[in-house]
Amino acid sequence: MYLKALEIQGFKSFPDKTRLTFEKDITAIVGPNGSGKSNISDAILWVMGEQRSRALRGTKMEDVIFGGTEKRGKLGFAQVTLVVDNTEHIFSTETSEVMITRRYYRSGESEYFINRESVRLRDVHALLMDTGLGRDGYSIIGQGRIDEIISTKSTDRREIFEEAAGISRYRYSKEESERKLEKTDENLCRIKDKIDEVELQVEPLRKQSETAKKYLLLRDELRVIEVSVWLENLERLKAQSGAAENDYNAAKQNLDAAHAELDAIYKATENYSEKMSECDVEAERVRALLSETETALAECDSAAKVLRVTQSNNAESIERLRREIDEQADRADGIRAQIAGHQARIEEIAKRCAELTDEQTALLESERENNETGSNLRAELASLVAKESELSSEISRHTTALTMLSDSTKELEERKTSIADETEQAEEKLSQIEARIRDDRVQARQSQELVKEQENRISGYRLRLASREDHLKKCTELCTKLTIDARSMDGRIRMLTEMEKEMEGYSKAVRTIVNAANNGVLRGIHGPVAKLIETDDRYTLAIETALGAAMQNIVVDDQERGRDAIAFLKQRDSGRATFLPISVIRGQKLNRVPNHEEGCFGLALSLVRFDAKYTEIMTNLLGRTVVAENMSAALRIAKKNGNNFRIVTLDGHVINAGGSMTGGSSAKGTGVLSRANERSRLLAQREAMETQIKEENAKLAEAQREVDGLRYSLEVAQEELRTVQETALKAEALVKQDEIVFAAAEEALDNLEKEALTLRRHLAENAERMEQLRKEQADAETLRDETHSAWVERSAGNAYYEQRREELTEKLSGLRSELSSLHTEREAALAAATQLQELCESLSGDSTQREDMIRELEATGESLAESIALKEQQLSEYSSRVAELKARISETVALRMELEGKRIKNERAGQEKNRELLDMERLCARLEQKKMAFEMEERQIVDKLWDNYELSFSAAQALRQNIENLQKSQRQVSDLKRQITALGNPNIGAIEEFERVNERYQFLMEQYSDVEKAKNELLGVISGLTKEMKEIFLTQFRAIEENFRMTFTELFGGGRASLVLEDENDVLNCGIDIRIQPPGKALSTISLLSGGEKAFVAIALYFAIMKVRPTPFCVMDEIEAALDEANVARFAGYLRNMSGKTQFIVITHRRGTMEEADVLYGVTMQEKGVSTVLSVDLEEAEKSIEA
């Protein structure tokens, strides 16, 4: 592979299209100073992707475009094409020839082509990488590259060695992987931030979701078990109903038979009746009276027995309540013992925390002292490093200054010859530029006015867009918030509706009566008090407290309806309830209500709303209760009024008539009245919210349309601005360029004469300055070595303080961890003690309620005793009456013994049969009533299936499960209802919301895992590349070092040289030292060599590199300029030896180099400022001369 051709157009001093063709051997490019021959080297460097304008000997990239001359205008672009042979397929393309083109426009746009196909800059770099032709390669060697490789900074020459070792591609891949790793770390941080944000939502939603799921499970379980219990009861009722039906039919048949027998007896005694009618009438009258008396006696005896059973039940209830009070007292003592245990532990933790805090303070003081000492030492080390770095920079500056002074001296000599010509040309150029400036200024002013006008339009668009985008953002946030609130509100409304439907919070007795009334079984039922009143949210808790258990009292039309309802409850064993008959209840209000008192809201009766027909009942319940704002106001009102009435506060505390007080904490919003108020309020709010959501969505759509329209207008205006700005920039650039040229020409004209006078003085000053710089450079190197030694001494001391700091940090971490653990334990103990204290107070309140129930039962017992005594008195009277009547019958029978004769037997039989008949009729009536009761209960269960769960009998059968123990299942139903109540108000919508948020959380976690996996893979790739780079670099470096020894000896005619890695443990980043010993001299560093020796060392190193890894072609730009004639000859000879593997293109002034070239190109400036290339084939020329 070799360089076949180079095409240049518009590049620097080559405005015309110029093509240079090259052969495989040595090509020399010669020409006078300033002719533009080095521009050929710059063109090759530029087309291979060089981006540093300084490396191209310019200040900005636009300088590479031909800038024009007196006769030619400046061009708009520069283009260079490199044609390389690829028959050996070193490049990764199928073609045998590779054409690389770069084009640059004054607008700043660049274009790259490979084989005429548009590519990116990175594609060009990738193509040339590891061929020696890359950005950091050694295919183009100029004075700058010589300075780099012989620089005192050993790190400056690393890039050349890496390109020579062939690891540039690996380093590029490694750097690319490291950039990806950095982006991956950024992605990890962003994902982690999102995960942290979502985690704040996940856990609360998880708990709400679990509560809601538990609620649904319990509700479904309750549904199955309760339906199964009802069906079990229904089967039992059907069996009992069938048995009752059979008993009734049998009793009816027996009754019919008894009637037939009685008729026969009456027929047999008809003859006797005619004769004894008067006696019969009297006897029958007495018997009838006797029968009524006996019936009354039986009823009175039955009532007395019922009263005695009730009295016994009351006594048992009193005994049971007393036992429960004793049990709760024992439990309260146990809880107080637990509270004492928790408080003792809290004190122990406080003591331990104080000890740990003292220890932590001591360690912090030790850490501060250690850090202060270490900080002072590190500051001193940093100062020494900075000083050493400053000295190194100063040495580098001296080296650069010496090189520049040497070049300056040469340029001053050349300058003297061109001053006279430039003076004449400058005067003519000034008049031309002045006219052009006037025209360009007019155009620039017009363009600038257009730019300002367009910028004002864009500013207006941006202000409007920013305002509308802010409005859009607010609309979006508001719509999102409203949607979330609506979902939460819907879930709450559904739950409250379901609880209202299930009559949650009402007793079993109340639910039974209301259901019976709704099903038409009971008449005259108005419902519980809580359903008949309304109040404002502010007073809900106060009214619930004032009513207490009376909220579940059931309002009925009259006492008969209440009696029927009580009988209904008793018949079904559904518990007890209090009934308030509208016809008899009368209320009484306070005569004087303290409305004028501060903090008094008036009677509770005035704060509730109800139908007028319930006025007396509500007056009875709330007419003597006052509502106060808080406990302080309540106490003040009670004191002023002598504790004559009951007072409740808004937060549920009570001051009873007489002065007793009830209070403490209470669960807000859990009462049935609170629930109804909350549901009504939420329904109203939801309706208003729905309207607001529709309005906000419409606003959001309108805002989005406005933003989209403004964005489009802004893009159009920005595109127009770019066009106008480009025109303005071009106009301003023309003006500035003309002004610069004018000023430069004018100044040049004034300074040309002065410059000629000062040239000789500058030459003398340069010589003096170069001598001074060499001395200062030697002093700086000595001082730098002393500074480095001091840094090494102080680094050892710093290690002790770093180790001490780590030990203190570890101890402090342990102390903080233990303190955190103790604080956590203390908080848990405090929470447990608080909960136990609340439980103890709750038990105390329950005991008070049970004592009140005992007093009520004792009062009821006294009333029952009085009723029993009355019934016993009535029994005695009825017994006496029965005895009297029986005696009268006996007298009548005795008087008519003789007359009755045979009739007595029939009459007695008729009487006996008549008694049997009466019993049978009673039995039939009871059996019929029992049968109807079973049928009614069956209907009630079927109604409950539909009312509670909307299930038909067949659908309920599908849900039924086997019931092994009915009582156990009923207890299970009660337990499930208590568990559901304990869950509070579950958010059913949280299930779906949690699934959505958790799905996003899991997605983010998976994404985090994937990115972390990608990070680990990148770390593995980087590690593998680093290992491979080390192996390749060490192998190639040793080969280069070996060849450098040989090349140095061959070029210098003896001596020794070596390459040394500064840090063999970090071969990929450490500097590379060059150690040389020219023949007859002591071993020294490069800085002590002469300029020619330095250049020759660099040349030797480049040749050594090319031996190990030949580059396809190499451009050398006057690198042998500092060599003497003998060394030039050696250089040229070595060049010839190397030309078999590498094509050389040499830009030179030296005769020895020219003589060794196969093809010679001459570069001249036949036209001022325009380079022209002439070609001479030396072999053909020699043949012509010989011929």
Image (spheres, rainbow, N blue to C red):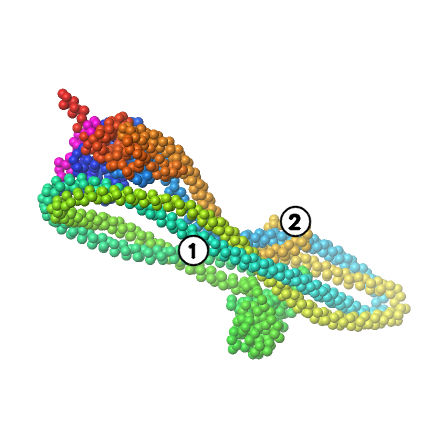
Residue 101 visible, this angle? no
Q: Position of residue 336 (x, y in %)?
A: 63, 62
Q: Amino acid at mark 1?
A: Thr
- Secondary structure at numbered mark 1: helix
Label 2 sits on what residue type? Asn
Which element is circle 2 on? loop
- Label 2: which residue? 962
The span shown in magenta is 1152-1175
Q: Quadrant of residue 547?
A: bottom right
Q: Is residue 1158 magenta?
A: yes
Q: Residue at x 43, y 60 (%)?
A: 691
Residue in front for this viewpoint, 51 or 1128:
1128
The answer to which image quadrant residue 1152 occupies is top left
- Residue drawn at 36 percent across, 31 percent down: 1038
Q: What residue does disc 1 label? A: 480
Front residue (pair 905, 1126): 1126
Give the residue drawn at x 85%, y 64%: 908
What kind of secondary structure does the magenta stretch mostly adopt? strand
Q: Quadrant of residue 1060?
A: top left
Question: Mark 1 or mark 2: which comes first in sequence?
Answer: 1
1182 and 1096: which is toward the camera = 1096
